[in-house]
Image (spheres, rainbow, N blue to C red):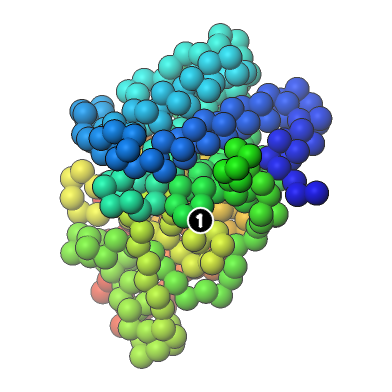
Amino acid sequence: MTETLDDHLRAFARADATSDAVARVVARLANAAVSLAEIAAQGTLAGPMNQVLRRNGSGDEQKALDLVAHELFLDALTDAPVAALASEEADEPIGITQGAPLVVAIDPLDGSKNIDVNATIGSIFAILPRNDLPWPRLFLQPGSALLAAGFTVHGPQTTLVVTLGDGVNVLTLDRARGLFVLTHANVRLPVGVREYAINAANYRHWDGPIRAYVDDCVAGADGPRGGDFNMRWLGCAVAEAYRVLLRGGVYLYPGDSRASMRHGRLRLVYEANPLAFIMEQAGGAATNGIERILDIVPHALHQHTPLVYGARDKVERVAAYCSGQLPQGARSPLFARRGLFRA
C-alpha cells in the first residue's frame, strides 16, 4: 500500500509530545497547500490573482494570490499548537494560541512573479520550538533550532518536500483524493553534477569571487574546471531547490554592489533557513558564502542573506572562492574583496 503524508506523520507523532505537535502542524500546512494548489490551478478563472494590491514592509509587491496564500496558511493554523506565525506578507509576527509549544515562519507564496506566465510557484515553511522566548525573539533563533521544514512546488504536479529532522521525503499530490502520497523516500542529493543556478543578468553587480566562480564554469572544458557546465534559472526559489534536490548541482543568490541587494534578496528566517535545513538533511550544504546558514543568529524577522546551497563539494568550492583559499596565480586579482556581500 502506498504511504501517504498522514501515514508518515502518524508514525512520527508517536515519539513524544513535541513530535505529535509538529506532525499536527505539518498536516495543517499540507492541507492549506492543497487548497492553494486548487486556486493556482484555476489561473485567471479564480480572478485577477496577479493583480498588485500593495507593497509589504520590505518593499516587495503583494499580489492578490500572495495575500490569498497568507490567509490560507493563517486560517489552517488557527487551532493548531502554534503560538505565533511569521509571514513574508506580515510586517510583524501574528499571535495565534498563547502558550502553544511551536512557532511557524512561512513564505506563503514564493515566485509570485511567475503567476502571469503560468510558471512554477510554491510555499516555504519552517517550524521552531517556542522555547519560552520573549515575544520579540520568538523567531530570532538560528536555523539549527528547526524542528521541521518543507516547501511545496506547484508546477505540472504539486509536490511537498518535507523533513522532520530525520531525512527528506518528497510527496506528490493525488488530486483525485486530495492527499499527498510518498514518491521519493529519504532523498539524497546527487553528487558530481556539473550544473549551477544563478541570475546571470546581475553579473555586472557581483563581487569578484562570484564572477570568478561563474567565469570558470562558463569556460567549461577550456577553463580551469576542465569540464562543461549547464546553467539553469527558474526565477522561483522552491523550483530551484526541488531541481537541485533531485538532480544535484549548486544554487547561488549572492549579495551584490546595489544598495538594496548588499545582503542578498532571500530572507533568512523563512526562506534560507528551511531550504538550508532540507539541503543538509539530504546530504548537501548551505552557506552565505562564508558561514553556514544554520549557524547565523537572526537580528531581524525579515533579515536578508546571500545564499549558496546544493552538493557539499560545490558549496565548499564557492566558499573557497569567497575566502581566497583557492590557489592564487591567474585568479588572485579577483580575490581583492571577500564574501558575497559588502559590509
Q: Residue 21, image x and y in percent?
A: 68, 24
Quarter assignment of residue 223: bottom left
- Residue placed most toward the observer, 17 or 254: 17
In the image, residue 256 sits, relative to residue 13, either above or below, namely below
View extreme (bottom): residue: 222
Quarter assignment of residue 123: top left
Query: Does the image show residue 59?
Result: no
Check disc 1: other Cα within 10 Å, few if <14, some if 14-19, many if 20+.
some
- Residue placed most toward the observer, 116 or 163: 116
Quarter assignment of residue 300: top left
Q: Secondary structure at mark 1?
A: helix
- Residue placed most toward the observer, 70 or 117: 117
In the image, residue 213 sits, relative to residue 138, either above or below, namely below
Q: Is residue 133 left or right of residue 324?
A: right
Query: Does the image show residue 227?
Result: yes
Number of on-image labels: 1
In the image, residue 217 sits, relative to residue 48, either above or below, namely below
Q: Residue at x 46, y 22 (%)?
A: 74
Q: Residue at x 66, y 54 (%)?
A: 183
Q: Residue 246, image x and y in percent?
A: 56, 62
Q: Amino acid at mark 1?
A: Tyr
Read off the residue under disc 1.
242
In the image, residue 191 sits, relative to residue 24, either above or below, namely below
Q: Residue at x 75, y 49 (%)?
A: 2
Q: Residue 118, image x and y in percent?
A: 33, 51
Q: Residue at x 29, y 61 (%)?
A: 199
View extreme (top): residue: 98
Q: Residue 62, image x and y in percent?
A: 26, 32
